[in-house]
Amino acid sequence: MSTNVGIAGLGVVAQGLLELVRSNADQLNVIAGKNLSVKRLASRRLRDGVDLSEIVFSTDLDDLLNDDELDLVIELIGGTDAAYDLIKATLERGRGVITANKAVLATHGNELLDIAREHDVPLAFEAAVAGGIPIIAALKTRFPANDINWLTGIINGTCIYILTAMAHDGVAFEDALQNAQELGYAEADPTFDVGGMDAAQKLAILVALAFDVPIEIDSVYCEGIQDITIEDIQHADELGYSIKHLAIGRQEEDLVEMRVHPALVPKDNLLAKVNDVENAVQLGTANTGVLRFTGPGAGGHATASSVIADLTNIASGLYRHPGIGGGSIRVRSIGDVSSAFFLNIAAADRPGVIASIGETLARHSISIASMIQKKEEVIRSVDNEIIPVVILTNTVVERELDQALEELESLADIAAPIKKIRVVDLT
């Protein structure tokens, strides 16, 4: 007995997959209960130094579809159009698919999972979120008798690398981004990562699995890290927090929160200690408290190991379709979310300004938990001196805070739009 596999793509993950399959062949065959054989590979071009001697190679993805000896296809080409067409056609021909493609799943996942169920073939995607961390497998069990109430994660390596460099090395965002690009952690066009969309796609998948709802990428609130400064990080540190780029999902009754944005995280929390390109996910469960998963979120071997987990699962007959709902969901608007906030207010350095800020916030029933007035950071202009006033509020509904900030920004003594960063309560 054997499981014959075709691979689409020959990038870093595909090369890592070939290496791991070859070096662990005997062990993998024992786990799968049959021989795992990579028979065919299709990619736009052959890569130098990659040994494909026992594998049929072509540049046409249709060759994977037309090879009747293949039992399943592993899609590792990335993007959406060609990958979507390949996955859909493979499933419709009654063959299983393994993919590491979060973009295809976020956009077409509901449809593709329906097709997989209709044809009773697997569609597995452990490698699509958080690289080598087995978070998809954990969520697919649905934690019987132990409902998941919330999840929070650091799931984009580019963002965490940049924020780590800013916090530990004191480099500006632009310099940290350039370093990330030189090291291969960020693309030439980094907008997708630093703007938060990569994390948003992954969150949509995690939320669907955790709460048995459809994948709804268009409903995820998304902010990136482009506006975070070294001063923000330093001020947060003084207040006892680290700034991380978080993906947050929460279910309360019939409402689901899905949001991706920078956030202040208490320094004693696991997520505050995640640095460089590491990923981490926390699950708040009903009966076992907070469960924590951490590990490499990217890299050829780490991601390939998740692909192999899916491969052995399918070959051994243990695969089960994920519990992702087909109905609609109600998503809580970001304006209705409650949290504490970090505010950075550029205020004129004159008597009475701090009092007017406090009075304005009080009129909107917003109380101040902490405040820092940074005299040494004064900015001198033609008309006056501007000083940053950093405030940590107590918990407030965001829509109510926005009304107060609009009123504050109309004051003559407030020199610029007020920066706000949410504070995350990880309980």
Image: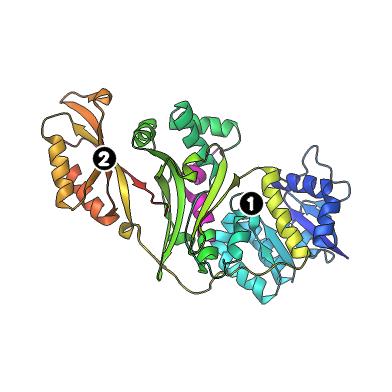
On the question of residue 411 being in view, the answer is no
On the question of residue 354 being in view, the answer is yes
Q: Is residue 203 magenta?
A: yes
Asked if residue 159 is positioned above or below residue 321 in the image, the reply reads above
Q: Which residue has dot 2 on it?
A: 370
Q: Magenta segment, which residues?
A: 186-205
Instruction: Give the mark nearer the N terminus: 2 vs 1.
Output: 1
Asked if residue 40 is positioned above or below residue 12 in the image, the reply reads below
Residue drawn 70% across the image and 59% down it? 98
Residue 405 point in image, percent of width and height: 22, 47
Mark 2 element type: strand
362 with respect to 232 (left or right): left
Q: Nearer the viewer, residue 277 or 101?
A: 277
- Tell me which amino acid carries mark 1: Gly
Between tags 2 and 1, which lies in front? 2
Mark 1 element type: loop
Q: Residue furthest bottom?
A: 118
- Tell me which amino acid carries mark 2: Ser
241 with respect to 358 (left or right): right
Residue drawn 44% across the image and 26% down it? 170
Q: Residue furthest left?
A: 352
The quadrant in which the N terminus is found is: bottom right
